[in-house]
Image: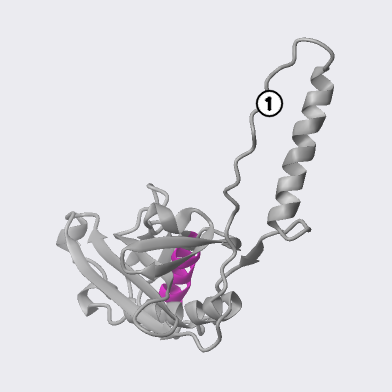
Amino acid sequence: MMRSRGGTGVLPRFGARRRGTSVRRTGATIVFSLTLVILTSCGGRVRYPNYYTLNLPAPPDPPHGGNAHATVAIREFRAPNYLKQGAIVYKPSPEQIDFYVYHRWAANPCEFVTDSVIERLRASGNFARVMSYDGRSGAEYVLSGRLEKLEEIDYAGGVKVEVAISAQMTNLATGLTVWANSVSEVGDVNKRDVPAVVSEMNHTMERAISKLLSPMPADVTTGPTAAERN
């Protein structure tokens, strides 16, 4: 797959001339040199990044009725630092991490995963109320999670994408973990370009979140006992 990488050229240092050269002329020379380097490294034109977002299908409306009484607050998902730098990640080998310089996420993937989990838990009907965690929400449970992987895989034959997510739910009254799950999904990319990679990331993310959130234990979705609330 073709990559777009940043240039690594080093500009020469300009020493101050004691006589006959103004600061303004030296500054103009530096700006011209920088412009020349940028244009040369980009094939004679300025290149701007392409931005992408994941776009999961909207979940169905929650079912009517049910005996769900529990409330849950969702913390923003965490992720390794390299996944939060903006550039789409690819791995040429299991040990190497690299980035597409001109292909970037329009928003932090952690925010996207958090919002998607909230939407799907609301649609499940398993909880009376699902909200974002703000530290004072009054929820009975808090769900915390981590986006472990969101990357293109370029080794072991062909081009693939991998999405890995983990999460756990804590009973705030007892401090105990009442549910935990982790999933890792891999998808094949049929076309060797970045839009095709992002499209497959979208499909793989949808499968991963669906598997992450099902099933939920019945004693969690119906809520804590009266003793646990007190």
Left or right: 21, with 150 as reference point: right
The boundaries of the magenta stretch are: 111-123
Left or right: 47, with 60 as reference point: right
Q: Residue furthest bottom?
A: 190
Q: Give the quadrant of the C terminus.
A: bottom left
Work out whether residue 90 or residue 30 is closer to the camera in this orientation and state it. Answer: 30
| Image color mode | one colour
User: Callout 1, which amino acid?
Assistant: Phe
Residue 102 visible to an observer of this rendering: yes
Q: Quick check: is 129 in the magenta stretch? A: no
Q: Residue at x 78, y 58 (%)?
A: 44
Residue at disc 1, secondary structure: loop
Residue pointed to by mark 1? 14
Q: Residue at x 26, y 69 (%)?
A: 223
Q: Label 1: few (<14), some or many (≥20) within 10 Å?
A: few
Percent position of residue 35, x then y: 76, 44
Q: Residue at x 38, y 85 (%)?
A: 157
Work out whether residue 122 or residue 184 is closer to the camera in this orientation and state it. Answer: 184
